[in-house]
Image: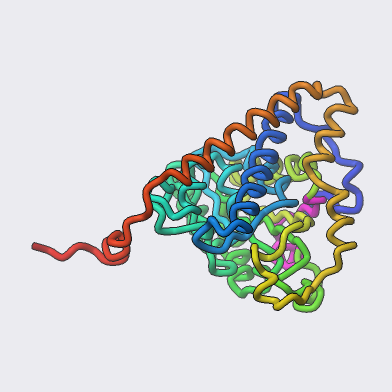
Amino acid sequence: MTTGLDVTSAGSRPGGGPPAAEALRLYESMVLIRRVEERLRDDSAAGKLPGAVHLYIGEEAVAAGVCAHLEDRDYATSTHRGHGHFLAKGGDVRAMMAEIWAKREGICRGMGGSMHVADISKGILGANGIVGAGLSIATGAAFGAKLDGDGKVAVCFFGDGASNQGVLMETLNVSSLWGLPVVFVCENNGFSEFTPSAEVTSGRIPDRARAFGVPVAEVDGNDVTAVWQAAGEAVRRGRAGGGPSFIEARTYRIQGHFEAESFVLSGGGYRAEEEIETWRQRDPIARFRSALTSAGTVPAADLDRIDAEVADRVADAAAYAEAGEPADPELAETLMFAPEEA
């Protein structure tokens, strides 16, 4: 059985858009992610960050639309491009920025860095530098949720590159067989690092879920309303005991695979500037803002207020991170090994 919307027919979505209060929350979530990533982009270019960062600019609608339906008790696993998922799930922006700056005040005490932000108290089981690793973690969390029987769900964000890992088929199989409350969210941004997906991926990614009888929704990942609607249906299904769901959100990363990738590529490229500009014109935040104001759902003044408040929050978080204490290198031993018995 398959359900959902084809990305080519996103204009005929049933049920209408989110109410005004929810629309404001979605807008704020996307703007917060964008402004944080822009600040990290600039700080990386200025040589202020201690490591590489993989930015989420252009993909904000996916994290915001999915996580709007999740509670702290629900679980989410992420990718190496995980700042947006962390923030959309309710992670603390100050603690995340401090972590990326490798400071003791960071969410992982400065020892995890950009690719390992996590907060178990918020159900954020962690970003992950291993491609596809979150699939099995989320499925295990969903198994625990089913045993608890209290309506929790688990969401796994992963990319089109990770869809070629065998673990996807393993987790689709077991989650369908056991009716686990897990939502697979494939952020198909068209590239596996520096390689166009068409060169390494055969067939259609959503069909891999259909083969296991998992309900599928294919949506425009730059349309936050489409993502929000598909995720709402998937989360409700999971909470009600209806088993797993699969969402393919087709989107695009405006930045490179990681900041400073030009040094790795020695000045070479793998995509045309015209392509990037075409996707800039489909910016999810600008599209949502235009839709809200044109329909009269939300006054422009309310969106302007959110813009200003978010700018202040990001500036505060960056200042907090920069002023923090460097991570304690002696933590490495205690985090890796259990203490010796006396």
Answer left or right for 225 relative to 214: right
Residue ID at (54%, 37%):
71
- Point out residue 226 in the picture as x, y percentages from the top left corner: 79, 43
Q: Quadrant of residue 204?
A: bottom right
Answer left or right for 15 relative to 9: left
Q: Residue furthest front?
A: 46
Q: Is residue 147 above or below residue 289?
A: below
- Point out residue 273 in the picture as x, y percentages from the top left corner: 86, 64
Q: Is residue 212 magenta?
A: yes
Residue ID at (75%, 51%):
58
Q: Which residues are magenta?
A: 206-221
Q: Is residue 55 magenta?
A: no
- Point out residue 123 in the picture as x, y percentages from the top left corner: 48, 45
Quarter placement of the C terminus: bottom left
Residue ID at (91%, 53%):
8
Q: Is residue 149 visible?
A: no
Residue ID at (82%, 69%):
271
Q: Nearer the viewer, residue 297 or 194?
A: 194
Q: Is residue 61 visible?
A: yes
- Point out residue 181 in the picture as x, y percentages from the top left corner: 58, 50
Q: How many marks?
A: 0
